[in-house]
Image (spheres, grey):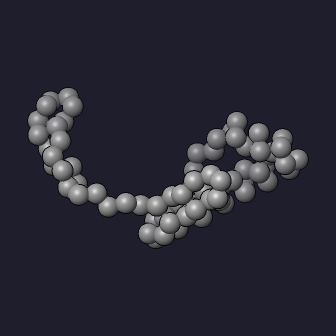
Amino acid sequence: MRRCYPTIDAVAATSGESKASTAEAIDAILETVTAAVTRGETVQLVGFGSFSTGARVERSGRNPSTGEPITIA
């Protein structure tokens, strides 16, 4: 997983925790949210946002480089 270092630095400074432990905590949260959404669950972080998957109907589109019609799943 790619870490967002400015975020880790800011959270570590605010919490007074080390950057290493802050990075571990942020990684754990993101992995947990990702796993839950992958299982089809909705994750709500009050005051932050909700994460879920959604099904979309197949539709027609165009390849932007060729203009060729394509079907988007």
Between 73 and 31, the one lying in front of the other is 73
Residue 18 in the image: x percent, y percent? 84, 48
Is residue 66 at all visible to an observer of this figure?
A: yes
Q: Which residue is drawn at 62% across and 52% down?
A: 48
Residue 8 in the image: x percent, y percent? 73, 43
**As drawn, which residue projects farthest toward the top?**
65
Q: Which residue is drawn at 46% across and 65% down?
A: 38
Instruction: Indicate the quadrant containing the C terminus: top left, top right, bottom left or bottom right.
Output: bottom left
Q: Would you identify the image quadrant in which residue 29 lies?
A: bottom right
Q: How many labels does the image show?
A: 0
Q: Would you identify the image quadrant in which residue 21 lies?
A: bottom right
Q: Residue at x 64, y 59 (%)?
A: 46
**As drawn, which residue projects farthest toward the left?**
68
**As drawn, which residue projects farthest toward the right?**
16
Is residue 35 at all visible to an observer of this figure?
A: no
Residue 19 in the image: x percent, y percent? 80, 46
Between 4 and 59, the one lying in front of the other is 59
Q: Which residue is drawn at 54% across and 57% down?
A: 50
Looking at the picture, does residue 42 appear above or below residue 73? below
